[in-house]
Every structure is written in structure tokens, then in C-alpha cells.
Image: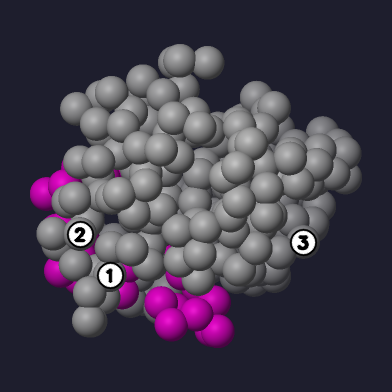
Amino acid sequence: MEEHVAHVKVKICGLTREEEAQYLNDAGADYAGFVFYEKSKRNVSIDQAVSIKKRLNPSIRSVAVTVDPDTDMIRKIEEAGFDIIQIHGGITKEEVAAASIPVWAAVNAKTSDEAEDRIRAIEDDLGELRDKIEAYIFDAPSFGSGVRSDWTGGGRPDTDKLFVLAGGLNSENVAEGIRIFKPDIVDASSSVEGSEGKDRDKVLDLINAARKGGKNE
């Protein structure tokens, strides 16, 4: 399992301002997340996200974060040039079938065992469509809350897809999360925010801590 630790990548989620793209460029992020969910304080329009996305280094993959998206939303996201669609909620056959870009399926759970059960249920329901899932995200029960799931007795769920650890990660605990769960990707949002959006220094600290924790400085 050590190979999962050695190549950990970092996603910074919830960008809302154009200058934040440069923070990710400077810090060497691998993924940038844009939230399309009206109930989130980080919600942006597709046009706003595209303006930010244009300022990202080409190596940074853009992730459109959605909750129960309809086919029209999925079409708009793909037309806007996003690399990945992240889906929270039901993860239905209709949503996955409508996507022509890779899908990240978010699993909101209290424990990794619960997350693994949820992954099995999703794959059983999707059948052959499971091949369109690129990654599973183990997130806290209330996504975007900055609250961590229970890591006690945790471990990497049994899946052949990429595994993303999210929920309450910060520069002080990300190395521990990498050690316990051996994720391919870590995902942070709330902990790297300042008074008006993402904070440059916090983004840099989080990514540096993840690189050290993942032994790929």
C-alpha cells in the first residue's frame, strides 16, 4: 500500500476569487475545486469559475463540485471545459451516464467502514457504469463543514479507484490522515480560508504538509 502514500496529490476546493488561482499555482496544487451548489457559501456561477480556471496552470485539473446535478447542469459543466465532475448526493445512474468527463463520487460517512459500505452500494447500483467513476471521496457527513469524520480504527477503503480523503483536513493533521488512510489525493477547503476566501499562506502550508506527509517533497 506504500505506493499510495508516495504519490499523494492535493486538491484545494472552493475557489471563489481569481487571485486564488495564483495561490494554487505558486503552491503546486494538483486539483482546483469549484462549488456549484447554491446552499454553499463558496457557491460560484459557471462563468465566475471559468474566469478563475483560466488563470490556473495547465497542469492543475479543474473539478466541478455538484450536489444531485441534473443533465442540463452536467452539460453546462462539460461545455465550460471542466476536467472532472464531483457528485455529492445520490450518485444515480442517470447522473453518471450523462457525464462524458471523469466522475468523482463523494461518500459522506462517519467512518471508513461506513464509507466502504457506501462505495459497494454505489458500485452495485451502477453496474457497468462504475467504470466511469475515477475516484471516491471519503468526506465528513456534512460536506464543506470543516468537520472531520471519525478516524479511529480507520483505513483505506477497498477500492480499485482513486481514493480521496476530505473533511476537516488542515496543515496539522493532513500527515496523520495520509498515514492512516494512504489516499491518492487529499482535499482541503475550510482550513485554508481567511477572511475573504482562500488564504495564500494557509494554502502553501497545507500543501507543504501534505507533500511531507506523503514523502514526495
Q: Amino acid at mark 2?
A: Lys
Confirm whether residue 106 shows in the render: no
Q: Any mark on residue 90, and which?
A: 3
Residue displayed at 75% across by 46% down: 114
Which badge, 2 or 1, comes first in the chain's sequence?
1
Distance CA(mark 2)–CA(mark 1):
7 Å
Q: Amino acid at mark 1?
A: Glu
Tag 2 near tag 1, CB within 8 Å: yes
Residue displayed at 19% across by 67% down: 199
* Residue 78 screen position, x and y as percent: 51, 58
Residue 20 within the segment the image draws in magenta: yes
- Residue 87 located left or right of residue 216: right
Residue displayed at 68% across by 28% down: 159
What residue did someone put label 1 on? 193
- Residue 94 located left or right of residue 14: right
What residue did someone put label 2 on? 202
Highlighted magenta segment, given as a residue range: 15-43
- Secondary structure of residue under mark 3: loop
Mark 1 crowd level (few <14, some 14–19, many ≥20, 10 Å Cα):
some
